[in-house]
Amino acid sequence: MSAETLRIALVGNPNCGKTALFNLLTGARQKVANYAGVTVERKVGSATLADGRTVSFIDLPGAYSLTPSTPDEAVTRDMVMGLRADEPAPDVIVAVVDATNLVMNLRLVLELRRLGRPMMVSVNMADVARARGLAIDIARLSAELGVPVVETVAVQSRGHAALLAELERQAQWSLPSQAEAKDQALSLPEAQREVRRILAVAAPGAAQFKRFNHRLDAVVMHPVWGLVLLAGLLFLMFQAVFSWASVPMDAINDAMAWAGETLSAHMADGPLRSLLVDGVIAGVGGVLVFLPQILILFLFILVLEDSGYLPRAAFLLDNVMGKVGLSGRAFIPLLSSFACAIPGIMATRTIPNWRDRLATIMVAPLMTCSARLPVYALLIGAFVPQRTVGGVNLQGLTLFVLYIAGVLSAMAVAWLLKRVWMKSSYQPLMLELPPYRLPNLRNLALGLWERARIFLRRVGTIIFALTVLLWFLSTFPAPPEGATGPAIQYSLAGYLGRALEVVFAPIGFNWQISIALVPGLAAREVAVGALGTVYALSSTGEVADALAPVIAQTWSMATAYALLAWFVFAPQCMSTLAVVRRETNAWRYPLIMAAYLFALAYFAAFVTYRVALWLGA
């Protein structure tokens, strides 16, 4: 077997650092998180060895055994055993194990070895084990397993050097001998005894190695103080979204204003100037300004992931999840939905029970995804005063309340679904807790860059395209002779907005808002850009003012509150509905999702608008 054609599968338990090692080997920008179930699909990347040869690495989902209990473990089993019809088994298996948790990790290594395929073992996090006094005899471990064993540190820039060097030495891979595959028929108790025997000679202190800080866990996972800590962390996160982002947001706003004024001063009046100023700058720039807030939100989420806190939050909330009928495993997919509902829905593959998985998919869109943040930030900035109450930023408090509203609504819908439609017994959460770790700066930087890249790509593609389309619909046809109002009133978009206004007038939405909701179906944050374009073209001046002051002057407080309520439940973007169709293999579930979300959004906005009017808003 030639190393030039090697296809190498990385296999290991969740939390062993396998995906971090994959990123280091290939330079891929994959999601790295410190909890089980983050990798739900295989990922492929390539690396070049020192001698110029290229090898292909396959990052498989984390698995505890080759006897799968979840769909992601089934993906790993099918790949390493060559059961997939669309591609062959890998040439080499690299079993990645956590050096601080060898007792658990080596059981999978014994299962992989019995397959009789070429393999090697990567003892990852070796630096952590060594710093805590755990001595691992790599040569003896290799002799006992009968396969090459190397140390790796996936969070260091050269932490994969030993692995690459071993791959270069192994120009020809041979199958393990029958003696090396002697655990082929071992039962689970026998495998555990074999692991203890191997560790007794290769890492005598592994069985007594303490991975956790029990004093810290006594507070973090306390049923009362743990919840207080979790609420405090979330509160701090939303305060920071407004407090820390003000300076960079002002800078982006100033840059957009300067660009608009410069183009207006140096270009002749006409369709091209209108497209650039009223379409691109007012639309795309109106969305781009919220990038700092999105990055601050994700910084907090990444820190909590990388530190090992999130699985503890999952256990802490397991009892609450059970009361509404959701599996404890639903916490992590729902938490992922704060970033975007798409990866959250895909992460439900870690839930073994189909009804529990379907219930989680149906409520995942109610978690407040980052695409809602530009809308929330615009409305809060326009209608909530920038002041502190008791030392608390009022705008950050409002954002916190909106996120809590999303969570509570998801729990309420889940409770209803599990009692009316998808009845099933509660299944307690079974999840391995990782040790606490200091967040890795490289992982944080890569995570933030990936989030910024995704956002900027959406701004430069779908948001830009929809903004240009909306500008066209808002500009043509030209107003008739003698028209006195803004040209947009006589355009295709104007006619569409007035037609939709009939539907949305009972909840306080004017025709401009009605127009913005349409492209918002493609991506929620487009609604902000659409409002920017619509109000820019509605302006009687040369250059439209900033959007927030304009809507603050033209909307009632009741309309603003109703629109906030609408976006708590807003019907999902088309991409999310497509993923639901793929994950459930049926059209009825995304159609049901779209229908119930629209009904909830309309009802919530109607009640909010009427109550606000009654209170004098």
Image (cartoon, grey):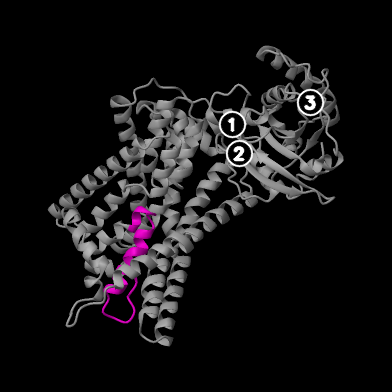
* Three-letter residue code for mark 3: Ala
The circle drawn on residue 75 is: 1
Provide residue 159's location: percent of width, then percent of height.
75, 45
Residue 153 visible to the viewer: yes
Query: Residue at 29% of width from left, 30% of height from top?
Result: 416
The circle drawn on residue 203 is: 3
The circle drawn on residue 182 is: none
Between tags 2 and 3, which lies in front?
A: 2
- The answer to whether residue 596 is above or below residue 428 is below
Which secondary structure lies at badge 2? loop
Provide residue 486's location: percent of width, then percent of height.
23, 76
Q: Write the start and end of the magenta stretch as one range.
A: 519-547
Quarter of the image that includes the C terminus: bottom left
Picture quarter containing residue 6? top right
Mark 1 or mark 2, which is nearer the start of the sequence?
A: 2
Q: Which residue is mark 2?
A: 42
Residue 410 horizontal side relative to residue 7, left or right? left
Residue 132 visible to the viewer: no
Quarter of the image that includes the N terminus: top right
C-alpha span from label 2 to label 1: 8 Å
Which secondary structure lies at badge 1? helix
Magenta stretch containing residue 531, yes or no?
yes
Provide residue 571's location: percent of width, then percent of height.
32, 47
- The answer to whether residue 173 is above or below residue 387 is above
C-alpha span from label 2 to label 3: 31 Å
Category of crowding for the residue at label 1, using alpha-carbon neighbours closer than 10 angstroms: few (below 14), some (14–19), many (at least 20): many
Q: Are marks 2 and 3 in contact (CB under 8 Å)?
A: no
* Three-letter residue code for mark 2: Arg
Q: Are marks 2 and 1 in contact (CB under 8 Å)?
A: yes
